[in-house]
Image (spheres, rainbow, N blue to C red):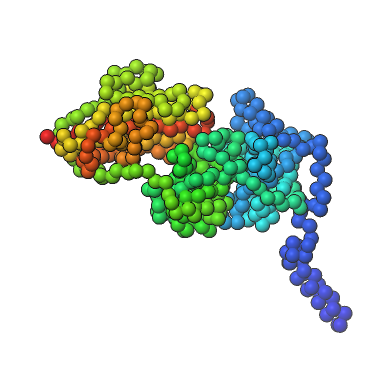
């Protein structure tokens, strides 16, 4: 009987021990080794895998699959973390650790799609990993280069039962120095890599907003961040499942670090922070522009001061209208006539600015109205319509000046403010639709006013959106 009791006790101890997490007792994690033995001649480069994908696209395929018998590995470093809930069932890896070294740029990154949560407990930020590519598929998911399993021409998640044999966790954890750059200089090669942007702030119209717990936030909170030097903006994306979603975004200016990516619909660029700590807006001196907000008028004036629908202009030729100024501040592209009946149809003929394929790093183009004597007319109002095509972080502003003298050479030295009541199409808006500005009041000011439609963009693929403008009308009451 005593022997039976001893046997039962021993079995009980073994059963308890089997329920304890292996990691607590120092048992090696599956897929990890003290000295990872990946043959050096089997390690490929990010660029080589990207070239395989590009070749597949050129051949009319959406994906490329590594043969199951081809033993090759990627060596990379984890730059995402799901610890705060802003990444889910994915790892973002890049091939360099120190972007302050010019030899490390341009970098490349991949998203790895895995049907496993809490990945940061095993593959934390900065962890060096090897990806065994045999049998895996490379494609684009929401515009982002992704490594996954392949099913026909689709990407499927790597499953829990197999991922530890695919992602090999080394003992090495490194410090990642993000690439410190500007929005203008970001390219497709920077996607899936860690980026730091300086002198940034939340757009003034979104002050007081949380990261992702507003009534409009369904899956992600999308907040506009702008650069104080160039005015260029980007969307910060925060999951509504993140643990910092209810925090109010800091209202000063400073730096932000995150993974450069695309939104879920692949419509615009986003920056995804790993946590709220990555948003360092501690400088209380914001860089908001001069602003005029007279609100919107309930009625439209019965008399028209001027109206422009660009019907007399020639397609793909610079706009030339008496009294108007079409000024190219930077680059080679200005406002031109445009007519189309495609999905991105014009309103008959419209004004358009399109820097794509121009070769210009940056484009700044102004279209300025004739002078408006605010003191000579009653209840002046402004209306116009705008549309865009995949704005790619480029943007359009509606500005006013009360001190410009009408001389082209003095445009940039004059004081220009924002007509904040006017709605202007945004990067995040549908590229098919035309948007009305609203009936914008002008009569809370005095003097002579010029109104400018200022485009800022460029010829590179992350900054080359198209904007259209039409049906500009200034009206008044007799």
The answer, for residue 93, to whether it is visible in the render is: yes
Q: For the point 50% across and 49% down, which residue is it?
A: 254
206 displayed left or right of 376: right
Q: Nearer the viewer, residue 478 or 414?
A: 414
Is 469 left, or right, of 32 in this rendering?
left
At 15% from the left and 31% from the top, the residue drawn is 303
Residue 61 horizontal/vertical position (percent): 61, 28
Nearer-the-camera pick, 402 or 188? 402
Q: Quadrant of residue 105?
A: top right
Q: Please, which residue is most extreme toward the left here?
A: 478
Which residue is depicted at the point 25% across and 39% down? 440
Q: Is residue 77 left or right of residue 429?
A: right
Q: Is residue 293 above or below residue 19?
A: above
**Image x and y of residue 24, in percent:** 74, 65
Residue at position x 17%, y 39% in the image? 379
Q: Nearer the viewer, residue 352 or 89?
A: 352
Which residue is at the front of the view, 386 or 208? 208
Residue 15: name its quadrant: bottom right
Q: Quadrant of the N terminus?
A: bottom right
Give the side of residue 58 with respect to residue 320, left or right: right
The quadrant of the image that shows the C terminus is: top left
Q: Position of residue 243 (x, y in %)?
A: 53, 58
For the image, the number of numbered tags is 0
Question: Quick one: which residue is furthest to the right in this view?
Answer: 3
Tell me residue 389's x, y (percent). 43, 31
Residue 212 seen in the current view: no
């Amino acid at each position: 009987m005593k022997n039976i009791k001893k046997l039962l006790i021993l079995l009980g101890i073994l059963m308890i021990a089997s329920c304890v997490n292996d990691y607590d007792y120092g048992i090696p994690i599956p897929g990890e080794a003290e000295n990872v033995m990946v043959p050096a001649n089997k390690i490929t480069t990010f660029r080589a895998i990207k070239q395989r994908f590009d070749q597949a696209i050129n051949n009319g395929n959406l994906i490329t699959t590594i043969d199951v018998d081809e033993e090759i590995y990627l060596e990379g470093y984890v730059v995402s973390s799901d610890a705060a809930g802003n990444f889910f069932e994915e790892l973002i890896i890049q091939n360099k650790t120190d972007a302050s070294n010019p030899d490390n740029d341009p970098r490349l990154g991949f998203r790895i799609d895995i049907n496993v949560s809490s990945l940061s407990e095993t593959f934390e930020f900065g962890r060096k990993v090897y990806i065994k590519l045999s049998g895996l598929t490379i494609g684009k998911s929401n515009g982002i280069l992704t490594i996954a399993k392949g099913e026909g021409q689709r990407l499927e998640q790597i499953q829990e039962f197999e991922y530890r044999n695919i992602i090999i966790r080394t003992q090495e954890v490194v410090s990642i120095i993000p690439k410190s750059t500007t929005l203008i200089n970001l390219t497709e090669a920077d996607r899936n890599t860690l980026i730091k942007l300086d002198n940034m702030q939340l757009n003034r119209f979104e002050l007081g907003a949380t990261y992702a717990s507003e009534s409009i936030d369904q899956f992600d909170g999308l907040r506009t961040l702008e650069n104080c030097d160039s005015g260029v903006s980007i969307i910060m994306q925060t999951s509504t499942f993140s643990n910092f979603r209810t925090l109010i975004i800091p209202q000063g200016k400073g730096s932000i670090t995150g993974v450069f990516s695309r939104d879920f619909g692949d419509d615009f660029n986003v920056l995804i922070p790993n946590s709220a700590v990555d948003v360092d807006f501690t400088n209380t001196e914001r860089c908001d522009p001069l602003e005029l907000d007279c609100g919107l008028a309930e009625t439209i004036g019965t008399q028209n001061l001027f109206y422009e629908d660009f019907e007399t202009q020639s397609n793909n030729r610079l706009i030339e209208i008496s009294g108007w100024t079409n000024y190219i501040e930077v680059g080679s592209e200005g406002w031109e006539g445009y007519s189309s009946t495609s999905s991105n149809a014009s309103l008959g003929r419209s004004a358009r600015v399109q820097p794509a394929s121009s070769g210009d790093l940056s484009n700044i183009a102004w279209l300025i109205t004739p002078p408006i004597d605010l003191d000579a007319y009653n209840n002046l109002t402004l209306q116009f319509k705008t549309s865009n095509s995949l704005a790619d972080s480029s943007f359009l502003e509606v500005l006013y000046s009360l001190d410009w003298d009408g001389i082209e050479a003095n445009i940039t030295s004059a004081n220009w403010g924002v007509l904040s009541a006017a709605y202007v199409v945004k990067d995040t808006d549908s590229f098919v639709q035309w948007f009305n500005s609203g009936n914008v009041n002008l009569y809370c000011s005095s003097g002579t006013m010029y109104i400018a439609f200022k485009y800022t963009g460029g010829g590179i693929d992350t900054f080359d959106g198209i904007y259209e403008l039409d049906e500009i009308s200034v009206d008044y009451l007799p």
